[in-house]
Image (spheres, rainbow, N blue to C red):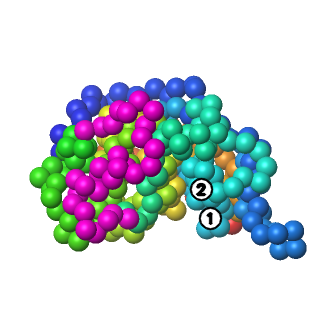
Amino acid sequence: MQGAVKLKPNVPVPEPAAPAVSVRNLHVRFGDRSNEFTALSDISVDIPEGAFVTMLGPSGCGKSTLLRCIADLVHISEGSISVFGRSPREAREGRDFAFVFQDATLLPWRTVLDNICLPLEVGRRSETGDHADPHALLEMVGLKGREKALPHELSGGMRQRVAIARALITRPRILLMDEPFGALDEITRDRLNEELLRVWQETGTTILFVTHSIPEAAFLGQKVLMLQAHPGRVKEFTKVDLPFPRSLSVRDTVEFIGVTAHLRARLEECL
């Protein structure tokens, strides 16, 4: 992202201790008693405030379900979730978090700027009435000058940048991202990975990011939350011991290869 932020090299990002999200003994079941399916079983985990946590696991392990439970989009069968000490519903109503899906879901008849401002026009306003400057967000995501463009005039990567800027307009404390770059080509995905790290370091937003890509999980995350399937449960919560800021060149290092090898071995155990 052009001119997003200037970073000093090899400056580690501190990991705060206070949890942004606390999940305790979470169970999620679908269906009735005669045809019940357990999607998540006894999940307990804390997401530190300001952290970048990636989520890995085989298909069907409940990564997206867990994200949606935090966002108050899926009913919890047992257990509890707190978001900054509040229930997911209270956090949603207070706009403590924003959600970015794999599809950018932009309104095709609205310009880039109007799509970014959409959250300010719908739903409950933030408790403080505060919001980010949409023009500053456009510059931060590298789309300055495209304010009046329509979604069909943008590439897939550009549309996802708009979706990220839209998610940040209400200054959420948590950004929930469900495979936001999964449909993009590898080069665009790599570029957005780097730029998302810059956004995170500039804003201090807590990010919980679902992916199927081991390199992506290792590159982005301070920690990797791995789930195993049938039913979905925590396999491992691994710290990624690589310094920030990170560039794509870190993926050629022995240390990065060691992290991905570890994650791959654990993931194979989840199948």
User: Could you say which is closer to the camera, residue 144 or residue 229?
Assistant: 144
Identity of the residue drawn at 29% across and 56% down: 115
x%, y% of residue 127? 45, 33
Residue neighbourhood size for the residue with mark 2, other residues' Cα within 10 Å, grouped as few (<14), some (14–19), many (≥20): some
Among all residues in the image, which is located at the extreme bottom? 35
Identity of the residue drawn at 54% across and 44% down: 92
Identity of the residue drawn at 25% across and 68% down: 109
Tell me: residue 28, above or below residue 236. Answer: below
Q: Is residue 244 left or right of residue 62?
A: left
Tell me: residue 10, above or below residue 34. Answer: above
Q: Secondary structure at mark 2?
A: loop
Identity of the residue drawn at 24% across and 44% down: 134
- Specify which label sits upstream in the sequence, 1 or 2: 1
- What amino acid type should be assigned to the residue bearing mark 2? Leu
Q: Which residue is label 2 attached to?
A: 73
Residue neighbourhood size for the residue with mark 1, other residues' Cα within 10 Å, grouped as few (<14), some (14–19), many (≥20): some
x%, y% of residue 126? 43, 37
- What amino acid type should be assigned to the residue bearing mark 1? Pro
Residue 116 on the magenta span? yes
User: Could you say which is closer to the camera, residue 90 or residue 59?
Assistant: 90
Specify start and end residues of the magenta stretch as a single range: 105-133
Q: Judge whether residue 157 can be spotted in this image.
A: no
Question: Residue 184, located in which quarter of the rendered image?
Answer: bottom left
Of the two numbered discs 1 and 2 in the rendering, the one whose residue sits closer to the viewer? 2
Q: Secondary structure at mark 1?
A: loop
x%, y% of residue 3? 17, 40
User: Could you say which is closer to the camera, residue 175 or residue 252?
Assistant: 175
Q: Is residue 42 left or right of residue 91?
A: right
Q: Which residue is label 1 attached to?
A: 58
Q: Quadrant of the C terminus?
A: bottom right
